[in-house]
Image (cartoon, rainbow, N blue to C red):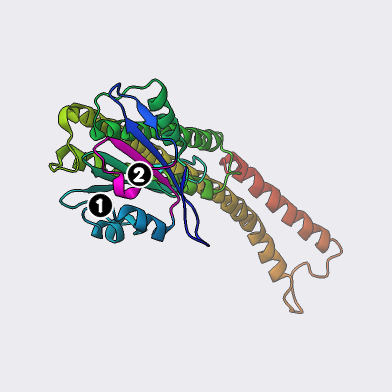
Amino acid sequence: MALAAGPGRTRLKIKSYTIGENLLLTEETGGPPHPASINDGRLRWVDILNPDPEELRQFLRPILKDDSIIDDYVLRERNLPVAHSEFELYFEFPVITDTEEFVIEYISFLCMPTLLITVHKNEVGMMSRLASNLCDNLHLKRATISSLIYYILAELVEKNYVLYMALREDITALSTKVIAEKLTIDIDAILHVKKNVDRVNIMVEDQLYCINILSVYEGPAFDIGKLGKNFKNLEEEIRNGFRFLSRYERRLEDLHQHYDLMLQDRTNNRLKILTIVAAIFLPLNLVAGIYGMNFDNMPILHWDFAYHTIIFLMVSVALTMVYLFYRAGWFK
């Protein structure tokens, strides 16, 4: 559905659902409800996708009793995770839908006693599927806005485990390569996974903050009613995510240290070879330097076999030193 817009503007994409007595959602047909009559007492969820700021402002002004929340919070790129006026409760709930890029997206929730408005820039597949299930066969616990909010947030939080499993697979793959001493991986691969873990941590922190506020909020905009235990369970589920992420951080730190030790060991081996070569050539350079001096009277300088003798001596010294280094274990 779409709200008609003026010339040169984008069309505001809106889906509207009402909560029936059977605890199922019903998608409203014939276009979204008019902003002037949207507060008709029916329990309603209005989902707005990729709105133009001016269109969104015009749509929300007749609905909100305190329209300052529109410019101060809804239309801001990022603000406080939670804010409220006397009659409206606003919060931004973060999600990550891409397990490759791990980009955080924030869904705006506007709560009123009989109305929930969600605003997001990109399509969130899990919300669309939940709306479809709530229309078909998934009953709400109660015919309240707080029950609808719980179902939406529970669906979003449940998808966190997809991120945890994706991170675990990445860490396991890195661990396998490092343990197998395959230094072909770039250190940037470890740092990339660390960055993704940090992003998920930020998302989970903001999710937990929102759930905590909803659990203790008292006001006309949101009544948790008998769902307090459900929100507590949701909070505990988010806290479990922190435990996953803490283990991942420790594993990544161990991998980073193990990788650094492997690189250091390889560097030490190379330096050891260079040290052996330098040690072998040191006495040879000494002999070459002595017999390179321009003195008239030097021992065996005019002897017929002097050159062969010196070469034999130098080769003997080199082979002896190689043997001694081998016995000492320097080539292991």
Mark 2 vs 1: CB contact within 8 A: no
The residue labelled by disc 2 is: 118
Q: Quadrant of residue 44?
A: top left
Relative depth, front residue between 50 and 81: 50
Relative depth, front residue between 94 and 200: 94
Residue type beneath disc 2:
Thr
Decide if residue 260 is in sight here: no
Q: Position of residue 151 (x, y in %)?
A: 32, 30
Q: Residue furthest left?
A: 218
- The residue drawn where x is 25% and y is 27% is 143
Q: Position of residue 80 (x, y in %)?
A: 26, 54
Residue type beneath disc 1:
Leu
Q: Earlier in the sequence, mark 2 or mark 1?
A: 1
Q: Position of residue 211 (x, y in %)?
A: 24, 39
> Which label number is shown at residue 64?
1
For label 2, the SS is strand
Q: The magenta stretch spans which residues?
A: 31-51
Q: Quadrant of residue 330?
A: top right
